[in-house]
Amino acid sequence: MKKGCYLILLILLLAPCTSAAQGHRVGVGLGSASGSYEQSGEKINLKGEILELPLYSYVANNGLMVGFRLMEFSVKGETASGLDRTELVFKQSVLGASLGVEIKIGNNVVIAPQIVKSYMGNSRFSYSTYTTYAGYLPDYPYEYVSDTNTITSTADLSGWEIPIYWVGKFFYIGGKFCAYTSKTEIELPGGPVNELSITGAISMVLEARF
């Protein structure tokens, strides 16, 4: 949490440097996200989506950029043991701040590496265990829900992003590669404390400048 406060403070201190502004940008990002769930030494990979809306940046003539965004992650996975199959769903929402620099490559392409840190967030972890039963009709087994639960917690995220944009007169369009460090501890009822993480994302970004 202290690192997040330091980043917010740094953005506030550098904001006056953007007085000669190149412009504001607001947009949306949508793509695929990855994560993991660690349980009793077993690591389960999670896959899903990321949505950033709104995605706001303020860029100075010297290339310095600061921004804020609402980030929504939803990743899923599955594990099986014997006759039991467990579906895992992890959703995380964070408000994040970013600090970076925009570098022009030619007339219509820019690259904008940034660091990102959240300063507020929450998460929701849900699991449902399905047990296969074939006691009455062995040739027609069926599944029933033997256990289900939803656990809420806080969320924290940090990392870096490298967006690459094609620049038009009014719009930026491109893609970005992201690597995150986001760990949430989940305490299961009567069980151990397990760990959930958001590890990365690849997304398409569309922004309008004004």
Image: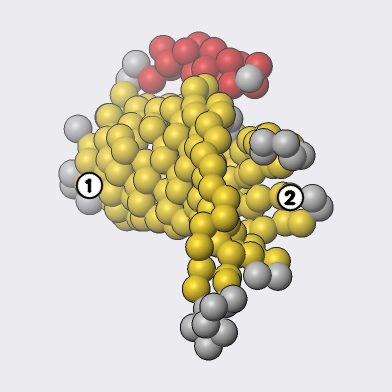
Residue 96 visible to the viewer: no
Q: Amino acid at mark 1?
A: Phe
Crowd around label 2: few <14 · some 14–19 · many ≥20 (10 Å):
some
**Which one is nearer the viewer's eye here, 156 or 22?**
156
Residue 192 visible to the viewer: yes
Q: Amino acid at mark 2?
A: Gln
* Above/below status of 141 relative to 87: below
Front position among marks 2 and 1: 2
Image x and y of residue 174, in percent: 35, 55
Residue 39, numbered circle: 2
Is there a contact, CB below 8 Å, between mark 2 and mark 1? no
Q: What is the secondary structure assignment of the residue under circle 2?
A: strand
Among all residues in the image, which is located at the extreme front?
A: 136
Measured in 3D between alpha carbons, the distance from the residue under mark 2 to the one under mark 1, in whole angstroms, is: 44 Å
Identify the residue position indicated by label 1 in the image.
171
Image x and y of residue 179, in percent: 59, 48
